[in-house]
Image (cartoon, grey):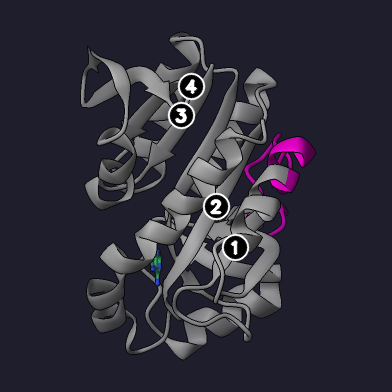
Amino acid sequence: MLAIIGAMDEEIELLLADLTAHEQLTFPGVTLHRGVLDGVPVLVTRGGIGKVNAAMTTTYLLTQGATRVIFTGVAGGVHPELRVGDIVVSTDCIQHDVDVRALDYPLGTVPGELPAWPADEVLRAAALDAAREVGGVHVVSGRIASGDQFIASREGVQRLWTTFGAACAEMEGAAVAQVCSKAGVPFVVIRSVSDTADHDANVDYRTFMPLVARHAKQVVRGMLSRL
Ligand code: ADE
């Protein structure tokens, strides 16, 4: 079954509104919504903010039969061409806040794990096709940098761009990617840009998040007919 995760209510309420045969499954800290969206059986959930919540939610989804996972939401743009409203489809995900350099592991690498978790090519292609239909926005295929930090400085953006070649910064994607990769379950992360992760990021985020969350939702709906 296809699973769709958003970090916050704004990111999934637009999908839940159209879910039919809606049934709720309650787990500690998370409610999963099982139903049918545009004729496709799905699990939809609000995963909460940050990598721990994202990993926990993904694990619940896998135990409930998720065989493909789409993560949708907003992000801070890092790629210099990204503007508010633009869309990033993941090539891969990294954890920018992992630092085990004292034991000679490269920055971002969890010991014993992949340095980056690649997204599924079929899901990526469907996401890119659907994103290009949104219209009026720039679509970038790129690396998602996740960490338990809201990035709101020019230095922070510069670090993610030069150290990791990241397209955008958010707080969950790589955790979903890590859990899915271990289970051999295909995933993709789709993010619309709510801010450019600089000193205005907090203001822009509050202003634009509910608006641009619609773009990510549109991409998910567009994907359903392509999968
Ligand atoms: N999500 C949206 N904007 C973000 C930012 N600037 N940093 C981290 N996560 C975000």
Between 195 and 199, the one lying in front of the other is 195
Query: Which amino acid is tagged 2?
Result: Ile
Q: Is residue 103 in sight in this rendering?
A: no
| Callout 4: SS | loop
Q: Which of marks 2 and 3 is nearer the N terminus?
A: 3
Q: Which residue is tagged 3?
A: 38
- Quadrant into which the N terminus falls: top right
Q: Which residue is tagged 2?
A: 190
User: Residues under labels 2 and 3: Cα distance?
Assistant: 19 Å
Query: Which amino acid is tagged 3?
Result: Asp
Residue 188 magenta: no
Q: Which residue is tagged 4?
A: 39
For residue 106, side relative to residue 224 (left or right): right
Q: Residue 88 carries which label?
A: 1
Q: Are marks 2 and 1 in contact (CB under 8 Å)?
A: yes
Query: Which amino acid is tagged 4?
Result: Gly
Q: Earlier in the sequence, mark 2 or mark 4?
A: 4
Answer few, some or many: residues within 10 Å of disc 4's Cα (few below 14, many 20 plus, some between 14 and 19).
Answer: few
Q: Position of residue 140 (x, y in %)?
A: 67, 68
Q: In the rendered structure, which segment of residues is drawn in magenta?
A: 104-125
Between 202 and 74, the one lying in front of the other is 74
Badge nearest the viewer, 3 or 1: 3
Q: Where is residue 151 in the image (x, y as percent from the top left)?
A: 40, 73
Query: Which amino acid is tagged 1?
Result: Val
Q: Are marks 2 and 4 in contact (CB under 8 Å)?
A: no
Residue 112 magenta: yes
Q: Do the residues labelled 3 and 4 touch (CB within 8 Å)?
A: yes
